[in-house]
Image: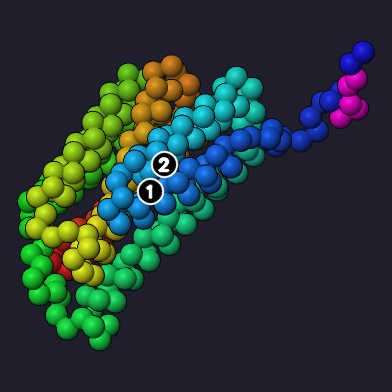
Amino acid sequence: MSTVTHTECLPASHPFHMVRPSPWPMVGAVSALVLALGLITMMHNHGPWLLITGVLLILVTMAGWWRDVIREAVVEAAHTLPVRHGLRVGVGLFILSEVMFFAAFFWAFFHSALLVSPSVSVWPPAGIQPLEPWGVPFLNTLILLSSGLTVNWAHHGVRADKRRVVVMALLATVALGGLFLFLQAYEYGHAAFAFHEGIYPSVFYMATGFHGFHVMVGVCFLSVTLGRAMRGQFTPDHHVGFEAAAWYWHFVDVVWLFLFVWIYWWGG
């Protein structure tokens, strides 16, 4: 005979969502560890397979976690007004932590570029041929700025309850993000310096490479948002998932502007 606890018989006395035990925080932590180890081993010429495994695990974590959160919002209707406020605050704090993450790379760059380190007497270092900022980097800047406009267009479409506009604008944003990644890969393939050739290449590839990774995550995020928009899961007063994707994408845009101005233009 089954037993039911007293708390399960009572209706919810508060508007908050009590999250069930989830495997995704642990899976995500392990995935991040594998990804970091894969980066280290690839930098030491041990092949890319551990890195590829880490990326795949990250993608599995993203898919599973997003699936569960979407189910909570759509099927269980657990995202009440206070819960949505908490989610917005959480996304804002996450983006703030990402700002600190990139601040470390800019700190390393300026520490050398401003000749603070006694080991660096000229910038860029002798023998380094920087990339031309007004070629692919400037084109990528225009692409990301355009994608910021299209995601804003999609946001206005959500608020006006125009699903067709939202879908078209998100399709354009995802396409522009994919084009950015393609051009950055092309740029890396034609760069005149390698990662291990000194402080300039190391900082350059770490800063722009991690930004490229964030663009890839943003494209995945927007693709999920696009799928939800096609299913009509956003309403003018309930679209926290869309807002999170849009905020993240704007953060990616702003970081790239700093990268272009300081590392590509001024630093080159």
Quadrant the C terminus occupies: bottom left
Residue at 18% over, 38% down: 182
* Among the 4 quarters of the image, the one containing residue 77: top right
* Among the 4 quarters of the image, the one containing residue 169: top left
Residue at 38% over, 43% down: 50
* Among the 4 quarters of the image, the one containing residue 83: top right
Residue 175 covered by magenta stretch: no
Quadrant the N terminus occupies: top right
**Picture layout, residue 103 above or below residue 90:** below
User: Which numbered marker is on residue 109?
Assistant: none
**Mark 1 packing: few (<14 Cα in 10 Å), some, or many (20+)?**
many
**Magenta region's main secondary structure?**
loop
Given the current orientation, which residue lies at the most extreme front position? 46
Q: Secondary structure at mark 2?
A: helix
Q: Position of residue 81 (x, y in %)?
A: 62, 35
User: Which numbered marker is on residue 38?
Assistant: 1
Residue 5 covered by magenta stretch: yes
Q: Which residues are magenta?
A: 3-7
**Picture layout, residue 251 above or below residue 14:** below
Q: Amino acid at mark 1?
A: Gly
Q: Position of residue 233 (x, y in %)?
A: 48, 21
Q: Position of residue 12 (x, y in %)?
A: 79, 29
Q: Is residue 156 left or right of residue 195?
A: right
